[in-house]
Image: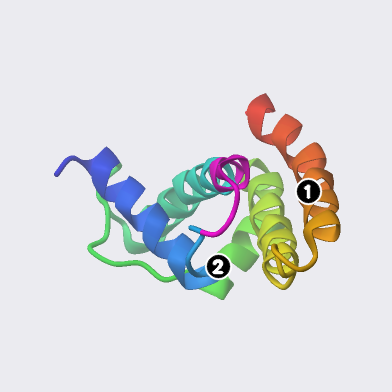
Amino acid sequence: MSGTGDAEELCHTVIEQKLGDLSKLPPEMVDCVMDVYREFMIGYLNMLRQKKQKPADWVPATVSIDSELTGQMRHFFSDYQHVTGKFYRLNLEVKRLQTLDRDNQQKLYRHTLDEILKRWVPQVNRG
């Protein structure tokens, strides 16, 4: 498997660790999560490589998000500050959405989803 494929697999693993199963979320929300996580994981893997003194194409076999390392990303590395902030904010938004009953709270669920997407999709597409 290529480094890119490994990185994508790690991204899915981290999503599962942080947010659980996304299969019940609408496709546009899943796409939004994937975009933010891909952007975050690029920076996170770069920081992890530097910390472990690994080459640029190194991808760990497994990964869990180290809060100390993400703390460094948020505070000391300006290139990663906004990416890490987006990662944490989106996690909170998705968890909030996941607390709603999609079937019994349809209007509230749709309103919350629309609110989240309105905030996130333009940010994700800006790159």
Q: Nearer the viewer, residue 54 or 123?
A: 123
Mark number displayed over residue 87: none
Residue 2, horizontal then vertical, whole percent: 18, 40
Q: Residue at x 66, y 62 (%)?
A: 91
Label at residue 19: 2
Q: In the picture shown, does residue 15 fall above or below 114?
A: below
User: Which of marks 1 and 2 precedes in the sequence?
Assistant: 2
Q: Is 109 in the magenta?
A: no
- Residues drawn in magenta: 24-32
Q: Please, which colouring scheme is shown?
A: rainbow
Q: Can you tell which quarter of the image residue 121 is in?
A: top right
In three-dimensional space, the C-alpha distance between marks 2 and 1, rounded to whole angstroms, equals: 15 Å
Q: Residues within 10 Å of mark 2 (few under 14, many from 20)?
A: some
Q: Which label is found at residue 116?
A: 1
Q: Amino acid at mark 2?
A: Leu
> Is residue 88 visible from the viewing direction of this image?
yes
